[in-house]
């Protein structure tokens, strides 16, 4: 698991869980630098990605967004799938309203 210095990291692909394809997706929603993730909402970013591309992207993309945001906001580098339960809970709660 990559563990870069979040204060000096420059490329999205230097972040844990972010490869070239995910970096392209983030660029699509105007996340160009790792610091751009700070304060962002992963669910909003996923909705924007789907809207802009006209495609429904896998919900696991939300997990990767959550992992990137969490890391840039001071969390430990953990695999993206550690956020799956959080995403499922969030989405099921929102569908009940």
Image (cartoon, rainbow, N blue to C red):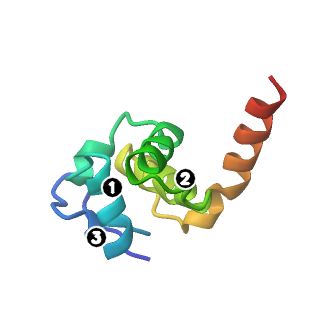
Q: Secondary structure at mark 1?
A: helix
Q: Report the residue marked by disc 2.
A: 62
**Mark number, residue 5:** none
**Disc 3 residue crowd, few under 14, some 14–19, many 20+, Cα 10 Å:** some
Q: Between disc 2 and disc 3, whose residue precedes?
A: 3
Judge from the rendering whether residue 33 lies leftward or rightward of residue 80; answer left or right.
left
**Between 60 and 15, the one nearer to me in the picture:** 60
In the picture, measured across the screen, residue 7 lies left or right of residue 94, that is: left
Q: Residue placed at 79% from the left, 39% from the top?
A: 92
Per the image, the residue denoted by label 3 is 13
User: First in sequence: mark 3 or mark 1?
Assistant: 3
**Residue 97 x, y percent position in the rendering:** 80, 22
Q: Quadrant of residue 91?
A: top right
Q: Does residue 8 appear left or right of residue 92 in this picture?
A: left
- Picture coordinates of residue 74, whole percent (x, y): 39, 46
Q: Residues within 10 Å of mark 2 (few under 14, many from 20)?
A: many
């Amino acid at each position: 698991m990559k563990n870069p210095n979040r204060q000096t990291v420059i490329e999205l692909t230097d972040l844990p869980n972010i490869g070239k394809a995910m970096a392209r997706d983030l660029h699509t929603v105007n996340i160009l630098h790792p610091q751009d993730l700070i304060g962002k909402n992963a669910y909003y970013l996923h909705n924007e990605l789907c809207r802009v591309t006209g495609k429904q992207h896998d919900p696991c993309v939300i997990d990767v967004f959550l992992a990137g945001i969490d890391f840039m906001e001071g969390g430990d580098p953990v695999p993206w799938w550690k956020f799956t339960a959080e995403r499922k809970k969030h989405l099921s709660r929102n569908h009940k309203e």
